[in-house]
Image (spheres, rainbow, N blue to C red):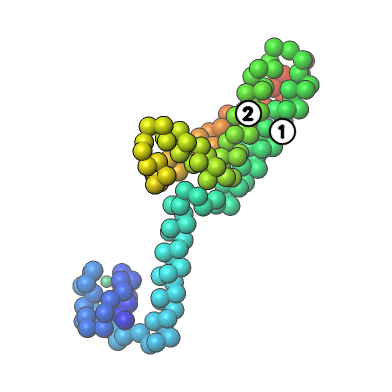
Amino acid sequence: MKVCKKCGAIQDNNHINCIDCGEHLGSPLTKEDEAKVDQEVSKSITNLSNRTDYFYVRKRDKVIAILLAIGALIFIILFIRIKEDYRPILLSGVVAMAIRALDIWFPWFSWEIAKIHYSFTIANSDDLQPTELSLIIRRLISYGMLIVGYAAIIYLMIYLYTK
Ligand SMILES: [Zn+2]
């Protein structure tokens, strides 16, 4: 195994020049270095597949889920404290934030629900796989909900405590 010093491409020992950039390749790696390179490659492959896996919950997702759950709790407190026409809005705040929190923490659950929905229109809905785009959209909706939810909380707090 040889590694190009210029572009980092890994190639067979029979190459004299790099297949990617044409740079002259030096002597092959030692067995030890080769094992190291193999390990790093397999590590970066696992990282890559984790990052795009619909059902993999990243640390950042968990933080978002916790913040959404806290937001839902604040909405419940506001619901109890505000005794006016605001209650339907507050209730929808509780539901929306709680649903987004559950969805981001338990992606398989929302996927099962989606599959039930598809089972009415598609014959072998069990074989369906979520797309990468659906993963991005799911995260964007949750991040958006977080911003909108907390903006509403701040507004309601000001309303409640400046009266
Ligand atoms: Zn190269």
Rendering quarter of residue 86: top right
Q: Are marks 2 and 1 in contact (CB under 8 Å)?
A: no
Q: Residue 13 placed where, x, y %?
A: 26, 83
What residue would you read off at disc 2?
95
Element at badge 1?
Answer: helix
Q: Position of residue 109 (x, y in %)?
A: 55, 42
User: What residue is shown with label 1?
Assistant: 73
The quarter of the picture where the N terminus appears is bottom left
| Above or below 119: residue 80 | above
The image quadrant that residue 126 belongs to is top left
Residue lying at 35% horizontally and 84% vertically, measured from the top left: 29
Res 156 seen here: yes
Q: Is residue 109 above or below residue 79?
A: below
Q: Amino acid at mark 2?
A: Val
Residue at (33, 71) in percent of width and height: 8
Residue sitting at x 57%, y 49%: 60
Amino acid type assigned to the residue bearing label 1 in the image? Leu
